[in-house]
Image: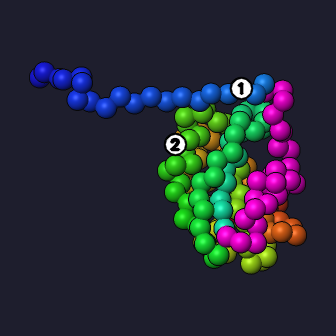
């Protein structure tokens, strides 16, 4: 079989990091995630829903943050494959998911819990740890890990 290499798309995977590991934020608990996400979500907190993923190295230092979804007032569609693909591309060891509830209700919905379980299952398959899913409001947050929901 003859293959014409000029008709096959080239795939490249890159991750450019210009920040020293020692200068990156460290995630020790849900409060650290909420503190970062309060800044990241400040412009959307009460307007529309956004979901973000923090990608972490083995020391739980933040390698980067990706806005994974932007939705409307009552929801955003998160594609688990994009999260896992990105985690693999940058060799992340762990991830934390966070999204805001513009309504101000800090409680996770059934959809939030289902999404968390789906991401957790995908992470387990590829050897990446999901450390938390934090739901943000303008006044407070809920950590699914702290509430024990992540471990069910």
Number of disc labels: 2
In the picture, measured across the screen, residue 108 lies left or right of residue 23, that is left
In the picture, measured across the screen, residue 11 lies left or right of residue 88, that is left
Q: Residue at x 60, y 72 (%)?
A: 72
Give the class, few, some or many, for how many residues have Cα within 10 Å of label 1's Cα (few <14, many ≥20).
few
Q: Quadrant of the C terminus?
A: bottom right
How far apart are the alpha carbons under marks 1 and 2? 21 Å
Q: Does residue 29 show up magenta in the picture?
A: yes
> Quarter of the image holding residue 91?
top right
Q: Estimate the x, y position of residue 130 in percent, counting from the top left.
A: 67, 49
Q: Does residue 100 show up magenta in the picture?
A: no
Query: What's the magenta region?
Result: 21-48
> In the rendered image of this protein, does residue 74 appear above or below residue 114?
below
In the picture, measured across the screen, residue 130 lies left or right of residue 24, that is left
Q: Estimate the x, y position of residue 151 in percent, counting from the top left.
A: 71, 59
Q: Residue at x 59, y 59 (%)?
A: 69
**Of tags 1 and 2, which is closer to the observer?**
1
Q: Estimate the x, y position of residue 133 in percent, counting from the top left.
A: 72, 58
Colour theme: rainbow
Mark seen at residue 140? none
Q: Residue at x 75, y 39 (%)?
A: 62
- Which residue is under mark 1? 18
- Which residue is under mark 2? 85
Kind of element beneath mark 1: loop
């Amino acid at each position: 079989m003859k293959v014409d290499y000029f008709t096959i798309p080239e795939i490249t995977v890159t991750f450019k990091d210009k920040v020293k590991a020692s200068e990156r934020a460290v995630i020790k608990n849900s409060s650290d995630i909420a503190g970062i996400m309060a800044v990241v979500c400040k412009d959307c907190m009460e307007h529309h829903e956004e979901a973000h993923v923090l990608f972490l190295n083995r020391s739980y230092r933040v390698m980067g943050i990706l806005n994974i979804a932007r939705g409307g007032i009552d929801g955003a569609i998160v594609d688990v494959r994009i999260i896992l693909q990105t985690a693999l591309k940058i060799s992340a060891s762990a991830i934390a998911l966070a999204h805001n509830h513009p309504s101000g209700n800090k409680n996770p919905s059934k959809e939030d819990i289902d999404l968390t379980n789906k991401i957790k299952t995908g992470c387990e398959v590829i050897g990446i740890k999901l450390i938390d899913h934090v739901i943000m409001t303008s006044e407070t947050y809920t950590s699914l890990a702290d509430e024990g929901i992540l471990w069910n």
